[in-house]
Image: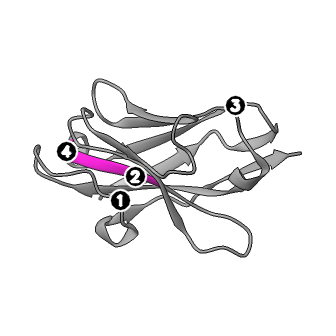
Amino acid sequence: QVQVVESGGGLVQAGGSLRLSCLVSGPAASRYSVGWFRQGPGKEREFVAAISRSGGRTEYADSVKGRFTISRDKDRTINYLQMNSLKSDDTAVYYCAAVSTILTAPVRTTANDYRFWGQGTQVTVSA
């Protein structure tokens, strides 16, 4: 049974930083590609960032490019989303998602591509 657990959310002032963590555990957890999505108040869930199984390729939404960085540890089971220069528009519940892929698979940026989801962690950016 694969489990995805996010942590690290909280309240931060505009311009500040937060680092979210996503632990993927279970059978062959290191074979998973991971993505971060978010859903703000009254908004639909949207793609934020994703990383390939190898960790060598990443994709970002235009709204977070240059401010957010996705990474994973060498065991490829803990994934991070470093968020800098936060804005009030970044306020949302952030979800981590995982899917088993082959090593050369492209980075997945669509929610429907992911099979396992965490419960989400709230990020609130105050003006």
Q: Which residue is mark 1?
A: 109
Q: Nearer the observer, disc 4 or disc 1?
A: 1
User: Under tag 4, what secondary structure?
Assistant: helix
Do tag 1 and tag 3 residues touch (Cβ < 8 Å)?
Answer: no
Quarter of the rendering containing residue 29: top left
Disc 2 + disc 1, Cβ < 8 Å: yes
Question: Mark 1 belongs to which amino acid?
Answer: Thr
| 4 or 1: tag closer to the N-terminus | 4
Q: Is residue 34 magenta?
A: yes
User: Label 4: which residue?
Assistant: 31
> Residue sitting at 23 percent across and 39 percent down?
30
Numbered label attached to residue 93: none
Q: Amino acid at mark 3?
A: Ser
Circle nearer the N terminus (4, 3): 3
Sequence-wise first label, 2 or 1: 2
Magenta stretch in the rendered image:
31-36
Label 3 crowd (10 A; few <14 / some 14-19 / many >=20): some
User: Main structural element of the magenta stretch: helix, strand or loop?
Assistant: strand
